[in-house]
Image (cartoon, coloured by chain):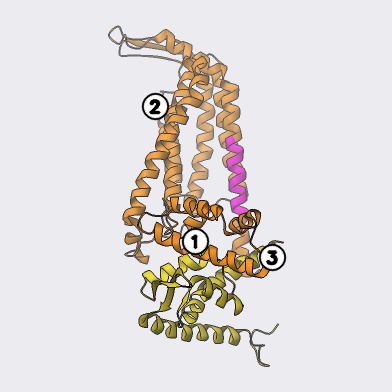
Chain colours: A orange, B yellow
Amino acid sequence: MDLVERYIAAVKFWLPTASKDDIAAELAEDIRCEIEEAERQKGRKLSEDEVSDLLKARGAPMVVASRYLPQRSLIGPEIMPVYLLVLKIVAAISLLPLVIFCITALFTAPETIASHLFIAPAGSLLTSFAVVTIIFAIIERKGIIPAKSQSWNPKSLPSVRPSGRIKRSESVGDITGCLVLLWLFFAGYLSRSEYWGYGGHIVLSPEWVPFWQAMLALALVETALSAINLFQPVWTAPKIFLRMMIDLGKAAAFYWLLQSHPLRSLEVPANASAIDAAKLVQYIDRLSSYAGLLMGLVAVIVVVTALWRLFRAARQHTVVKTLAGK
Amino acid sequence: MGDQSAFENLRLELRRGSLILAVLGALQREQYGYTLRKTLEDCGLPVDEGTLYPLLRRLESQGLLESQWREEDKRKKRFYRVTPAGSEIFARLVAEWQGIGAAILHLNQPPSGDSHGSR
């Protein structure tokens, strides 16, 4: 019987104070009945091992006790999707300062990156996770979102945007950017490599002039493509290919420019001593030494984006064909 | 293996709801926990104590059952029986359960000759 008493005591430990004695008494009685019946069938007393097996079959004390407790969750299934979405957004935001720090440190003090790469994000991620979880636990406890979901209105749902459709705002933005570039070029701002003004003097590499000419040519093609997209806002294979070539062309032009020691000298006005001209030139040159890596990364992003657009366009085509019953 | 596990899970889900009916039905006559388990087992509805006792407490807290500690064979036992409210709900649930059973049987009948869904 000692084993049974120990088992009951262990179950009691996990039970709520108000009902633990009552539950334990009923459980003990049930176990006694089961033992008595087993002993009647065998015609003898059960051994300690047999009692132990019988208790084991009932389950661990904590598991048994948990069946008597109301089902509780820190964050329930109703708000779980919102919780996960907020966690992802907060994780991205908390990592943003690190990304900015790494990019800055790449040009100023690269040796400090490694030491900041793991400790700082782990701390900020853990804090964000804890804060978001506490807020959602309070929401769950107060039942705020389930109450709100009772009063939802189907008419307030956002309209469905067909996937693969090019946003008009995107096309208008591209065209505006190209027009600004055109204006700057024809106004003469981009056709020289030396600039004076406000007591300062900037000398650029001569490669800047052909660079802007190449960018202008690409901008003209981009304007034409954006104009077409404005009226036919769907990606097709030729348009995806053209967009990719324009972007790769821009990346290649930047790479070529960065190789040319683009900022030759910088003289700042005497009253603007806060700007360390020599350091700025040094930073630009350091950036140039990473030109291959940076532009290679940009090229990969451009190609992956094009492949993704191609995949989505192909999928959309398949869906339309399926819906048309072809 | 996967099919068997899926079947077991679905069977448990199906039994969970039906078990309430079985308990309310069996407790039309007063019984204590262990004899109730035996009654259900003898009727082909074996249920482990970890499921039965919490269910009895839940039904009692809902006012469908009432219980009483009493001495029997020199031992204190907790006897349960259905309350009048429990009996009324039991009758309604049985009607509902029979309706579900009839609907499922109807849905499982072989299609008649002029079926629209024939292949």
The residue shown at (46%, 45%) is A171
Residue A54 located left or right of residue B27 = right
Of the numbered discs in the image, which one, if any, rests on residue A187? Answer: 2
Q: Which residue is mark 1?
A: A28
Which is in the foreground here, disc 2 or disc 1?
1
Q: Is residue B10 above or below residue A181?
A: below
Q: Is residue A262 visible?
A: no
Q: Amino acid at mark 3?
A: Asp
Q: Secondary structure at mark 3?
A: helix
Sooner in the amino-acid sequence: mark 2 or mark 1: 1
Q: Residue A298 at what x, y percent from top left? A: 56, 31
Q: Residue A100 at what x, y percent from top left? A: 44, 26
Nearer to us in this view, A185 or A272: A272
Q: Is residue B78 visible?
A: yes
Which is in the foreground here, disc 3 or disc 1?
1
Write the start and end of the magenta stretch as one range.
Answer: A301-314
User: Quick one: label 2, few (<14), some, or many (20+) residues within 10 Å?
Assistant: few
Marks 3 and 1 sit apart, C-alpha to C-alpha, by 38 Å
Q: Chain of mark 1?
A: A
Q: Amino acid at mark 1?
A: Ala
Verify whether residue A307 appears in magenta.
Answer: yes
Q: Which residue is mark 3?
A: B3
